[in-house]
Image: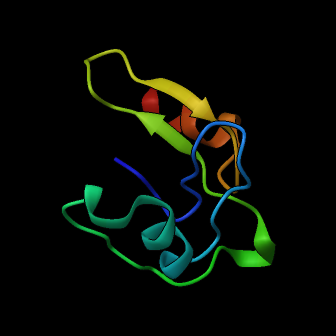
Amino acid sequence: LAVTSANRSGRPEATTGRQAAAVFGGRVDVLVDGGPCPGGVPSTVLDVSSVAWTLRREGAVPKADLLRYMA
């Protein structure tokens, strides 16, 4: 899962769908563009590939908010 603030390691975060598409080109099957990140704050990245979710990057949604929903 890559969100609008997707980036390659060490590169700036994309904050729009257009920027994310440019970064990943044809390597992404589906891009859901929900508009630019509010205030330029990158999205929170949550790895849900296993039962135990992992916070990969704290962004617009703070860890405390996630913990309330994950409890």
Give how far across and how far down residue 59 sits, in percent.
70, 49
The image quarter in which residue 52 lies: top left
Taking the spot 76% from the left edge, 63% from the top edge, the residue there is: 41
Q: Report the front residue among 65 and 14.
A: 14
Q: Residue 14 in the image: x percent, y percent?
A: 63, 65
The relative height of residue 51 versus residue 36 in the rendered view (above or below) is above
State the scheme by which the image is colored: rainbow
x 57%, y 30%: residue: 56
Among all residues in the image, which is located at the extreme left?
A: 29
- Residue at the image point whose x is 67% and y is 35% from the top: 63
Taking the image as shown, residue 46 lies to the left or right of residue 52, namely right
Query: Image check: 55 left or right of 38?
Result: left
Question: Looking at the picture, does residue 58 appear above or below residue 56?
Answer: below
Does 10 sit above or below residue 25? Answer: above
- Residue 44 % position (x, y): 60, 48
| Image point (33%, 31%), residue name | 48
Count of number-bearing discs: 0
User: Is 35 situated left or right of 38 in this image?
Assistant: left
Q: Tell me residue 58's x, y (percent).
A: 69, 39
Please identify the residue farthest to the right as the structure is shown: 39
11 relative position to 49: left or right: right
For residue 16, which quarter of the picture? bottom right
